[in-house]
């Protein structure tokens, strides 16, 4: 295969051709199209993919961890993370429309322990601690 770089508008590869970055056995980063979708893949199951900006100081905006979490950052601080049991949000949540929750929902008063409110789905009741 001959690759000519510097065409008028793009470098183009056929479907199912992989661009391998890094000198490991499988590379640290793989980029390819399977004919249906574009894929960005870490070269190992334990590898991570980081999306970073290129501003005055490089900051991670998102991190994709093999067999683990997806983390989203604001100003280089993690604010959203997927976990084995769901998600964790650091900071407030703002919605612009009505939200629906399924199951028990607890409003935890982090300032005054024991003064929480829980919607108990099995009792169909709002409970005040």
Image (cartoon, rainbow, N blue to C red):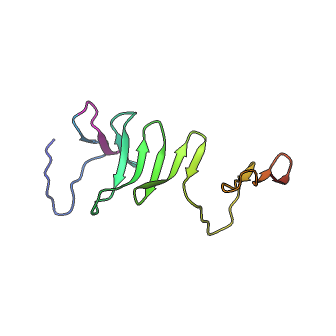
Span shown in magenta: 24-33
10 displayed left or right of 15: left
Residue 26 is covered by the magenta coloring? yes
Residue 53 is covered by the magenta coloring? no
Residue 123, image x, y percentages = 86, 47
Reply above or below: 3 against 45: below
- Asked where in the image residue 16 lies, by quadrant, the reply is top left
**Residue 54 seen anywhere in this rendered image of the structure:** yes
Foreground residue among 103 and 73: 73
Foreground residue among 107 and 30: 107
126 displayed left or right of 77: right
Residue 57, image x, y percentages = 29, 59
**Residue 102 seen anywhere in this rendered image of the structure:** no
62 displayed left or right of 113: left
Residue 33, image x, y percentages = 34, 47
- Residue at 34% x, 56% y is 59
Q: Which residue is farthest bottom?
A: 96
Foreground residue among 9 and 104: 104
Image quadrant occupied by the N terminus = top left
Reply above or below: 45 against 51: above
Residue 129, image x, y percentages = 80, 52
């Amino acid at each position: 295969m001959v690759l000519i770089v510097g065409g008028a508008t793009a470098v183009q590869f056929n479907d199912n051709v992989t661009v391998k970055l890094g000198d490991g056995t499988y590379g640290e980063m793989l980029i390819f199209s399977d004919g249906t979708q574009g894929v960005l893949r870490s070269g190992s199951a334990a590898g991570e993919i980081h999306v970073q900006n290129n501003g005055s100081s490089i900051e991670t905006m998102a991190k994709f961890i093999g067999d683990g979490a997806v983390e989203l950052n604001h100003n280089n601080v993690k604010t959203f993370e997927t976990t084995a049991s769901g998600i964790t949000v650091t900071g407030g949540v703002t919605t612009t429309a009505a939200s629906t929750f399924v199951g028990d929902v607890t409003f935890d008063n982090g300032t005054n322990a024991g003064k929480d409110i829980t919607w108990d789905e099995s009792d169909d009741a709002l409970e005040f601690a």
